[in-house]
Image (cartoon, rainbow, N blue to C red):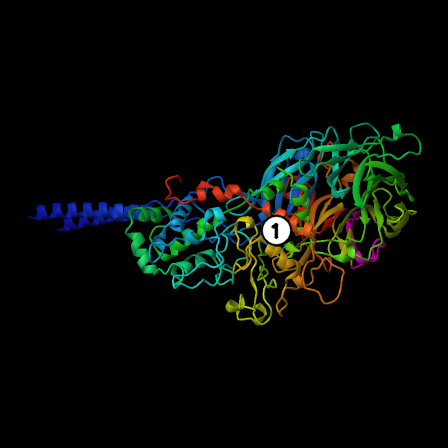
Amino acid sequence: MTQRLLISVIALTVLATGLLCYGLWRETVEPSATPIAGFSAPFVFGRFTIPEDNALTEESFALGRHLFYDPILSGSDQVACATCHEQQLAFTDGQARRVGLSGEPLAFSSMSLVNLLWGQRRFFWNGRSTSLEEQALLPIQDPEEMNQDLDSLIEELSASARYRELFARAYGEVSAENIAKALATFMRMLISSDSKYDQFLRGEVKLSALEEHGRKLFMAHPDVKVSLRGANCIDCHSQFLTSGFRDALDGFSNNGLDDEAGLPEGLQAVTGDPAHRGLFKVPTLRNIAVTAPYMHDGRFATLEEVMDHYNHGIKVSETLSPLISEADNSIEEGDRPVGLHLSEDEVQAVIAFLHTLTDKTFLSDPKLANPFDGKN
Amino acid sequence: MQKLKEKQANILTVVLALVIAILPLQNNAQSQDVREESHAMVLLRGLPTLDTSHSVAIVELDPESPDFGTIISEFEQPDMEHPLHHLYYSPTGRLYATGLDPVCSLAEIGLARDASGAPTVTGVNCLDTQGQMVGEDIMWHAANGNDYMFVTFMGGLGGTDGGSVGVFDPQSNGVIKVIEARRSQVGEGMPYIMYPHGISAYQDRMVVSSTIHPDLASGVGNAITVIDLNSLEPIENIVTEKENPIDLPSSPVEVLFARPSIDPNIEPAVMVNTMLGFETWKIPYDQETKTFGSPEVIYSGVENETGVPLEFYGNETELFISHALPGVVKRYKLSELPDLVSSGPDIIADPGAHHMIFLTSKSGRDLIAVQNNLLNLGNGADNDPTDVDFIAKLNAHTITVHDLQTGERLASVNFKERYDKGVENIEGLFGSGFVHHH
């Protein structure tokens, strides 16, 4: 009897051990932190930092890519991150403000997701998140966007053998924290650095005369004293990334879209500081030609409309950026609209340069595409 | 029962061992916040008697950092007989270096970022200069609606009165023209180019200096050459020579075309440092008539007990001039140029004070780092075959870091002692202030 009991105990123990090992293998053995193969980014984009507990790895990228394209992330199982962030539109959706689940338009347009390793460290148009990991979970839970309960999502993902394995390889357990980390990794890897402008910066191509004229205007703050004409873009959009600046809240600006009476809260909603009223995140201009409509509320349908705004449509308010209010190419004085007062040829040159920021490689890179699509 | 307990214990041990063995691996922390504002790009010269290679390196220069003086990354050039000489960032962010080795008188340096965000040197691409040798300074300037990269080659195409200015396509790096005018060939009184080193331009006039033959023995210049950027031809020489403190021609080295784009108060003029005349000169320029006035000494090294003035560097408000002897950087109000009006105390560096960068410390302190080597040649005490007595005394092999406001020396790193190398040139990782023309 004792011997039989002993054999039974041993057998059960071996079985339990096997199951435990298998379970642990599924959940924890595989995280191997494989560095992203062949990672290289342009030097001129500047230093970037990655959270110590969320290294860029092939495993986290693979998981993040699956999650990004999977509607399982929404309460209805019908809305994925990619629904509002389409690769061919530089991860925007082509809409001014998408209609939310209640039938009302969302507060903001979908921001382009590109080169998020660099630039301003606050995310969303009003800067309400301070990390990509934090940002990643908010649309999932937003009742107007994906309306998903995180506990339910974890249950759904845990029920999937594929996701259990993807999580096991990347992080270990299925958790909200690891969902956020994986999505953040995928977004960090959305690097656009092969536009015509990038090729120009590397010395591989020349810009056309019109594009080069536009580039020089883009990079110049106008100074009539020394006959320097400029489109003033660089005061807010940095030279290489064309995004807002990283330091403090420099990457936010009131660019004169609304007058005092109509000025929305913007960054003030986050900081509570009245000086931040009407300030919104300065977006990247990379792939701008494919990310219409423009501005935080998508009010401008074309780049021509955007340039019209900066040229003679600036609305004055208390928090209007002085970099914008003081930028004028005209020496005429008097009661005139605030704006750049560029010539039509100059406007067209700036637009031509903006088109050089389109990165077709990025927009069609299969590594960033929907993994559930048979082609990818 | 005891045996059962032992067996259970053994099984438990095995299970525990298994569990421990398969504990999830920790993700490696990839990067923390790293300040690059205090990182310098340096060109290092391997010293022949110390068996070291030339290299391009990135160095931490924040005295507040525990890594002060540490080489963060380095790209060795074991096959180069002579090192790269001077780094320049182009307006579009490409990194170039002139070089002293005839096989690499001009190069583009590849830079990228790895998965931790750290900068890495990916390679050195030596460019075709069509035979022009010993690259010195680079300047990007537009003329007649065209953008050019101009490079002075002190050795030019060779010979005892050689020297050329290479005109390059700034995108393709291809040679557009070699501007050469040998004194022995142009005829008496005609404009020549010889041993060109410094370069600067304003509107359609460019100036280059005539310094010294690269072998330091075949000849020494005493003038600058004015080049018409419409024709890309030399049109005039202007002699800048007065005192001869070491009985040699003045050897104009760096030039700066002071102009309103540097500060709106500036009346255009060419400023010239004479390496062996120990002086700084100004040559007024009338942009209406496109004529230069009489050259005038505005700083005398003999009177001020300094020698070998070398570089012009600037930030938003000040101009800095390095004097290799005794190793000092003097500072002037930018708005008062081309006159030299002191803006603060001298920065006492080391013998050989030469190139410099502006940077900030972690606490936000404004700093200046000075590279203290004239030519990085070896010292006779090391039985170094490159020893030149006069110059060896001007090779401290250090980078000294000072408070920009007060000039107080905060830290120093000796590259010869620490790395068995000399430091040939220094540049901010992202550029720093303006150097020479830029």
Q: Chain of mark 1?
A: B
Give the percent coordinates (x, y) of residue A355: 59, 46
Give the percent coordinates (x, y) of residue B220: 85, 35
Q: Is residue B154 left or right of residue B223?
A: left
Element on which disc 1 rests: loop
Residue closer to the observer: B6 or B83 = B83
Q: Quadrant of residue A222?
A: bottom right
Residue closer to the observer: B5 or B44 = B44
* In magenta segment, residue A58: no
At label 1, the amino acid type is Phe
- Number of numbered discs overlaid on the protein picture: 1
Residue closer to the observer: B173 or B124 = B173
Q: Is residue B260 left or right of residue B410?
A: right
Q: Which residues are magenta?
A: B321-344
Q: Is residue A63 left or right of residue B272?
A: left
In the picture of the structure, the residue carrying the numbered disc 1 is B68
Give the percent coordinates (x, y) of residue A255: 61, 62
Q: Residue at x 58, y 48 (%)?
A: A45
Q: Residue at x 75, y 50 (%)?
A: B313
Give the percent coordinates (x, y) of residue B113: 55, 44
Q: Residue at x 60, y 38 (%)?
A: B75
Q: Is residue A35 visible?
A: no
* In magenta segment, residue B325: yes
